[in-house]
């Protein structure tokens, strides 16, 4: 008994005393939300949320297309040019376009961000740039766990976990599929996984029931410990006179096209000279289509459309191109793109399809490399956005 | 949920231990294996990811062992080994088929496959030609025992069976306290020390840095991390096993104090070292001994067998340059030490240290072994910048 007292009870006593005296210090250092001090309130592009409360709180705050439009996508948004919508439209119109995403921000990541903010979705103006690369090869497995976490903080997931409907159930299922990839999943991710697994059978339900109860208890405890989230208001911008804006599209298209062609004359693909020399020269492009049965990304996309439809978001899509001269078998990806197109059309959404497999019809100036937009390509998208949301007369 | 991956696992294990303690009060010893099988099955089928994979592997290995050993009585064990290791080999070779867009690994691989394959092979190798097949429930428990499911230690069937036979009587206060202490040690190793090393030491300098001090830092930090992480798992498995009435073999005993490669493998991942010795080194050495051309070269025979054994260990981790090279290096260390031992024996004295004070020799040996193994494991880690 004396030994047990020495080994267990005295350390337990010390641990309790430590927790009693340092409780507040530990909580404030370990659990509180941190806001990045250098957050720019005039931001136009968000690379990721990375638990940045400011960006998270601002996301979809104005569901009015005369104020802010959200442009969601992946790697193409990282290349800042004057023509990219979050620069071009924000510079010329009172409406601000905010770009969100970098490489890997695919359908499930976007779905989850939007689901967490579903109460802000009604009429929210959103443009989603769909990259054909998401639906082929390894990317067709869907968003990776690491990328998912960059865009979906515990705070977002908490909001999802509070509801139970077909969308949250899909979220739980996908989280469960990704679960083994998370190295130290947070409580909300764990709860989602256990919730999904408890639906598999009665045995699962019985075994996971106590775990779910404990998980909810811990989430509650944690919620009480952390300081309340600070409410941040949207920054007001001085509106420009949009009705007076006149864009000379023809001259913009001509000049940007000429510039692209001038800088891509060392190859027959229409790829920028420097990019071609460094990355493409001597290589053959090939796409690896993935059938609908195995294409997780396609399933995620369908759920994304369903969510947007249900929540009545003011959404439109851009299907970005791939270079058909470089990717020899691009035609093989056509059936997948057709499914995407049909899905968008059948739900009555406006879209711009830049995907072209015919090498003769393909506009060589539209891409900078093999998959990312050139200035000319972005102007085409700018025009589409401006017309869709009627930003100018 | 994988074993030891989160605190929820420990909640489930607490429920399992409670179920076993309650069962002890109701059932006789004969039913221990049945209760354990039910608990293992619950974990495998409900909690473990890809449950069918593991269950199919158990059925596959049991019936194939029966067919190979009892029905067809194939004498050359190598065929049986290749067939039984087929699932693991398919994963290691990373095969791609046209009908499936991703690597085959996505379908067939699952956590714990390597360790299960080692146990399967161990059982097959140990089984005498006329020995009766193990009863299926014990075999199932042997392969699916929850604490050792993921990361070992690599147990032997006979040892597991004898422990299982007295399972209920091993569930007592004394064993519970020993198990608890071991579990706490494992938790401290894995979730405190390894975690601290991972967060604050392991990644101070980039893997790509070729500066000598950075490389030394990366080498030592990885060695310590690997030990505390791996030993943490092993101690947790040992502790939980003890509380559930099964004696799991000890896998780590102060490897940093090893004085030679032989001693190192008696302290570091002991179960793997023993497995390799019993099922690969010894048969290979016997095979080489029978070769006429090698009869005159006993040291060469031993050294070939040693290097091949460690090369296999490297390949088991994957067919990548860092694994193969580190395996070869570990084999070379053992071969050098083996040659040194034989020379000392022949000359009747220590051919390197001579009459130096044994304590000084021990200290030098510890430093030497520590650094050479840290280097081999640095290569193993894939962080050695000259290989990337």
Image (cartoon, coloured by chain):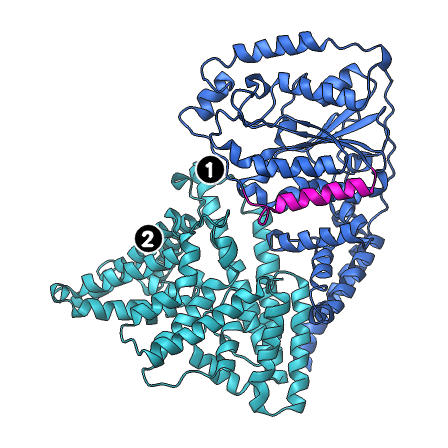
Chain colours: A blue, B cyan
Residue B57, percent from left and from top: 48, 68
Q: Chain of mark 1?
A: B
- How crowded is the residue under tag 2: few (<14 C-alpha within 10 Å), some, or many (20+)? many
Which quadrant is home to the C terminus of chain A?
top right
Q: Is residue B321 left or right of residue B297?
A: right
Give the numbered dot on residue B329.
Answer: 2
Q: Is residue A221 left or right of residue B254?
A: right
Give the numbered dot on residue B208.
Answer: 1
Asked which secondary structure carries label 1, the reply is: loop
Query: Which residue is found at the position 50% from the left and 21% from the top?
Result: A275
From the image, give the main secondary structure of the stretch colored magenta. Answer: helix
Residue B152, percent from left and from top: 49, 67
* Residue numbers of the magenta segment: A290-312
* A301 is within the stretch colored magenta: yes
Query: Which residue is found at the position 78% from the left and 20% from the top?
Result: A387
Query: Which residue is found at the position 55% from the left and 47% from the top?
Result: B201
Q: CA distance from mark 1 to mark 2?
A: 21 Å
Which quadrant is home to the N terminus of chain A?
bottom right
Establish if A334 lies above or below B7: above
Q: Quadrant of residue B350?
A: bottom left
Asked which secondary structure carries label 2, the reply is: helix
* B89 is within the stretch colored magenta: no
Establish if A366 lies above or below B136: above
Residue A113, percent from left and from top: 75, 41
Q: Quadrant of residue B337?
A: bottom left
């Amino acid at each position: 008994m004396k030994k047990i007292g020495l080994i267990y009870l005295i350390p337990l006593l010390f641990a309790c005393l430590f927790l009693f005296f340092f409780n507040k210090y530990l909580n404030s250092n370990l659990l509180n939300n941190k806001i990045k001090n250098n957050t720019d309130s005039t931001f136009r592009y968000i690379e990721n949320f990375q638990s940045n409360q400011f960006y998270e709180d601002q996301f979809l705050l104005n569901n009015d297309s005369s104020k802010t439009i959200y442009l969601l996508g992946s790697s193409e948004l990282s290349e800042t040019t004057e023509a990219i919508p979050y620069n071009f439209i924000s510079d010329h119109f009172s409406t601000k376009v905010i770009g969100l995403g970098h490489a890997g921000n695919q359908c499930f990541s976007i779905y989850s961000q939007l689901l967490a903010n579903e109460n802000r979705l009604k009429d929210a103006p959103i443009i989603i740039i769909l990259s054909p690369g998401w639906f082929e090869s390894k990317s067709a497995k869907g968003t990776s766990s690491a990328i998912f976490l960059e865009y979906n903080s515990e705070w977002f997931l908490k909001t999802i976990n509070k509801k139970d409907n077909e969308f949250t159930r899909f979220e739980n299922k996908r989280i469960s599929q990704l679960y083994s990839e998370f190295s130290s999943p947070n409580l909300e991710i764990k709860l989602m996984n256990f919730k999904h697994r408890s639906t598999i059978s009665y045995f699962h339900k019985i075994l996971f029931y106590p775990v779910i109860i404990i998980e909810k208890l811990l989430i509650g405890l944690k919620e009480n410990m952390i300081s309340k989230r600070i409410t941040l208001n949207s920054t007001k911008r001085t509106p420009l006179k949009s009705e007076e804006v006149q864009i000379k599209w023809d001259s913009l298209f001509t000049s940007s096209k000429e510039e692209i062609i001038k800088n891509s004359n060392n190859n027959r693909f229409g790829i920028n000279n420097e990019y071609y020399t460094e990355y493409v020269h001597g290589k053959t492009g090939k796409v690896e289509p993935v059938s609908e049965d195995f294409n997780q990304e396609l399933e995620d996309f369908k759920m994304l459309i369903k969510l947007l439809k249900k929540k009545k978001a003011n959404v439109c899509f851009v299907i970005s191109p791939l270079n058909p001269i470089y990717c020899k078998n691009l035609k093989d990806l056509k059936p997948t793109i057709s499914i995407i197109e049909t899905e968008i059309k059948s739900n009555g959404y406006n879209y711009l399809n830049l995907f072209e497999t015919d090498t003769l019809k393909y506009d060589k100036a539209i891409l900078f490399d093999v998959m990312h937009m050139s200035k000319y390509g972005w102007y085409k998208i700018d025009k589409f956005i401006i017309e869709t949301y009627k930003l100018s007369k | 949920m994988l074993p030891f991956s989160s605190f929820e696992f420990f909640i489930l294990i607490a429920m399992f231990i409670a179920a076993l303690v309650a069962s002890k009060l109701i059932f006789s010893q004969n039913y221990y294996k049945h209760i354990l099988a039910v608990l293992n099955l619950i974990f495998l089928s409900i909690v473990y990811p890809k449950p069918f994979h593991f269950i199919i592997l158990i059925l596959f290995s049991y019936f194939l062992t029966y067919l190979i050993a009892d029905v067809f009585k194939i004498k050359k064990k190598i065929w049986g080994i290749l067939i039984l290791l087929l699932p693991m080999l398919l994963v290691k070779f990373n095969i791609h088929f046209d009908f499936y867009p991703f690597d085959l690994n996505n379908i067939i691989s699952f956590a714990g496959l390597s360790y299960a394959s080692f146990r399967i092979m161990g059982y097959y190798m140990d089984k005498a030609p006329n020995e009766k097949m193990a009863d299926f429930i014990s075999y199932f428990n042997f392969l699916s025992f929850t604490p050792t499911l993921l990361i070992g230690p690599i147990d032997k069937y006979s040892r597991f069976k004898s422990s299982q036979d007295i399972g209920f009587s091993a569930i007592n206060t004394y064993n519970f306290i020993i198990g608890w202490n071991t579990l706490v040690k494992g938790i401290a190793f894995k979730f405190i020390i390894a975690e601290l090393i991972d967060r604050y030491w392991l990644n101070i300098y980039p893997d790509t840095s070729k500066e000598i001090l950075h490389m030394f830092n990366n080498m030592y930090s990885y060695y310590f991390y690997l030990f505390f992480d791996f030993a943490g798992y092993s101690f947790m498995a040992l502790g939980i096993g003890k509380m559930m009435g099964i004696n799991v073999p000890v896998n780590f005993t102060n490897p940093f104090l090893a004085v030679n490669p032989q001693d190192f493998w008696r302290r570091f991942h002991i179960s793997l070292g023993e497995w390799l010795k019993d099922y690969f080194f010894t048969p290979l050495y016997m095979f080489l001994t029978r070769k006429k051309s090698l009869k005159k070269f006993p040291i060469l025979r031993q050294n070939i067998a040693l290097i091949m054994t460690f090369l296999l260990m490297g390949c088991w981790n994957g067919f990548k340059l860092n694994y193969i090279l580190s395996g070869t290096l570990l084999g070379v260390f053992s071969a050098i030490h083996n040659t040194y031992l034989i020379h000392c024996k022949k000359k009747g004295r220590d051919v390197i240290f001579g009459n130096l004070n044994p304590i000084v020799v021990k200290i030098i040996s510890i430093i030497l072994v520590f650094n050479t193994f840290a280097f081999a494991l640095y290569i193993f880690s894939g962080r050695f910048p000259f290989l990337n």
